[in-house]
Amino acid sequence: MDIQSYIASGKLELFVLGELSDREREEVIELSKKHPEIKRELEEIEDAMFAFDDKTGVKPSEAVKDKIFESLSMDLVEEKETEPEPESVKTRPAAKQVMLQPWKQFAVASSIVAFLAILAAVYFAVMYYDVEERFTALLQERNILSEELDINQARYNSLDEQFETLLSGDYERVPMLGESFELQKDARVDVFWDKSTENVFVSVNQLAALEADQDYQLWAIGDDGPVGIGIVKPGEKLTLQQMEAAASAGAFAITIEPKGGSEAPTLENLVVIGEVV
């Protein structure tokens, strides 16, 4: 038998603490009878336990020490078949209670500290996740605002250029209304026409959306009758949509036509009309 391996196994410490089963206790007692090294190790462990209690726990009385040593001595000299007396059985739990008290307190304190550490870790993890989500939401909101700013800036620049165009030429505004027609009484569209350059622009104030297979078509009505000069996009409101040139016109009108426009206007689909003053 490897004595040193047996000593290093920890059974002797558990024997002193009273944590072994009856069979294991008998094994330790039997081996301590045969091997002086094991007996000496048991005595050193007991001395170390008492020294530990002197520093960290309640110091056991001499009577308790005497009872522990007396119990160990009795176990060493008794035969294996001898049953322990009731008084010996009662004495060992008492010694066990005194010696284990500091270890139990340390274990409970360690468990509480570990539990509090876990709670703190969970709390800070939740806080970090919440802050990260809010930061991500702010970044997304900033990106959306930045995109909207870019769009508005481009729209402003376009409007600025369009106003420059109107101011630089001799444009006449021709308002067209839908009050006289049943299709769209609230329709309002402005035509800007420069007679000298023949340039025509349209600004939509109000036009209803159409079916996918339909378009609004602008007509310049002159001495030779109506001439189609472009498709009007109802969704591009308050912007200038450039149409084809118009050499002469006494009025402008918009009708609803099949997709892409028609050669001649569909008069029953007349939406707005405006006369040139």
Image (spheres, rainbow, N blue to C red):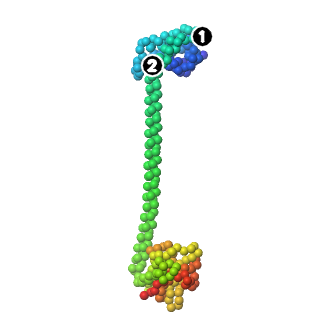
Q: Residues within 10 Å of mark 2 (few under 14, many from 20)?
A: some
Q: Is residue 8 visible?
A: no
Callout 1 amino acid = Glu
Relative to 184, residue 42 above or below:
above
Mark 1–mark 2 Cα distance, whole angstroms, equals: 29 Å
Residue at the image point whose x is 48% and y is 83% from the top: 180
**Total of numbered circles in the picture?**
2
Q: Is residue 96 visible?
A: yes
Indicate the quadrant containing the N terminus: top left, top right, bottom left or bottom right. top right
Is 227 positioned to the left or the right of 135 in the image? right
Is 2 positioned to the left or the right of 103 in the image? right
Which residue is the site of mark 1? 81
Q: Could you tell me which secondary element the residue under label 2 belongs to? A: helix
Which residue is the site of mark 2? 98
Closer to the camera in the image, 243 or 71: 71
Residue at the image point whose x is 53% and y is 86% from the top: 227
Q: Earlier in the sequence, mark 1 or mark 2?
A: 1
Is 53 positioned to the left or the right of 87 in the image? left
Indicate the quadrant containing the C terminus: top left, top right, bottom left or bottom right. bottom left
Q: Could you tell me which secondary element the residue under label 1 belongs to? A: loop
Q: Residues within 10 Å of mark 1 (few under 14, many from 20)?
A: few
Residue at the image point whose x is 55% and y is 77% from the top: 215
Closer to the camera in the image, 188 or 228: 188
Residue at the image point whose x is 53% and y is 90% from the top: 224
Q: Classify residue 34 by image quadrant.
A: top right
Dots 1, 2 in contact, CB < 8 A: no
Q: Position of residue 203 (x, y in %)?
A: 46, 77
Q: Position of residue 75 (x, y in %)?
A: 54, 11
Q: Position of residue 210 (x, y in %)?
A: 54, 74
